[in-house]
Image (spheres, rainbow, N blue to C red):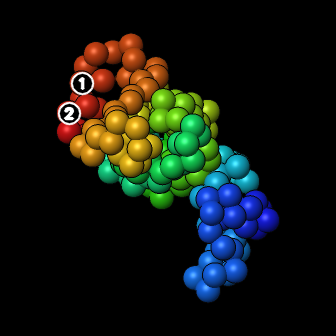
Amino acid sequence: MEKIFTDLIEQIGEDPEREGLVKTPQRAAKAFRFLTQGYEQDIYEITNDAIFTSDANDMVVVKNIELYSLCEHHLLPFIGTCHVGYLPNGKVIGLSKIARIVDMFARRLQIQENLTRQIANAMMEILQPLGVGVVVESKHLCMMMRGVEKQNSLMKTSCMLGNFRNQPQTRSEFLHLIS
């Protein structure tokens, strides 16, 4: 990967031996590995036995989970927040594990539409709740720094599964709680 970054620096017309760029290929490779570490993670290792039996049957919502991802079309960041809600069905999950699930999928080359669905599907798989709702709101640097250069645009995506899809009152409660 370091060679690729050296080649990239040369291809844009820079000198990879210039003082400020000498260690850039190593730093960039390390950063890129970190930004894409989600490929090396597994949902069951992430949850790490933090799923607990519970009689709770009211909606659980975690909102404003920061996320950082890379657009698979331009390799530029998109940055935003994720809101996750679920209706327990005999099991709950440790709070930090929801954020770790968001990070696992965000730390891959992504489009926001797929990211939203992947988070919801993972929550359904590991908890088997009565329903899951996920909303992601992000600013995309591929739209801000290049192309149309729109600085204030915000993309919102949602995925509603189970009761969040089938019961309007459940969906409304979730959307009200995250607003």
Asked if residue 23 lies left or right of residue 83, the reply is right
Q: Residue at x 70, y 80 (%)?
A: 17
Q: Residues within 10 Å of mark 2 (few under 14, many from 20)?
A: few
Q: Which residue is mark 2?
A: 176
Element class at badge 1:
helix
The dot on residue 59 is none
Q: Residue at the location (51% across, 49% down)?
A: 76
Q: Give residue 50's position: percent from left, percent from top.
A: 58, 55
From the viewer's side, name the closer residue of 101 and 131.
101
Q: Residues within 10 Å of mark 1 (few under 14, many from 20)?
A: few
Q: Quadrant of residue 18?
A: bottom right
**Please, what is the three-letter code of the amino acid marked with disc 1?**
Ser
Question: In which quadrant of the rendered image does the C terminus lie?
Answer: top left
Q: CA distance from mark 2 to mark 1?
A: 6 Å
Question: Quadrant of the rendered structure where residue 49 is?
Answer: bottom right
Q: Which residue is mark 1?
A: 172
The x and y percentages for residue 118 are 56, 34
Q: Residue at x 41, y 44 (%)?
A: 146
On screen, residue 128 above or below 142:
above
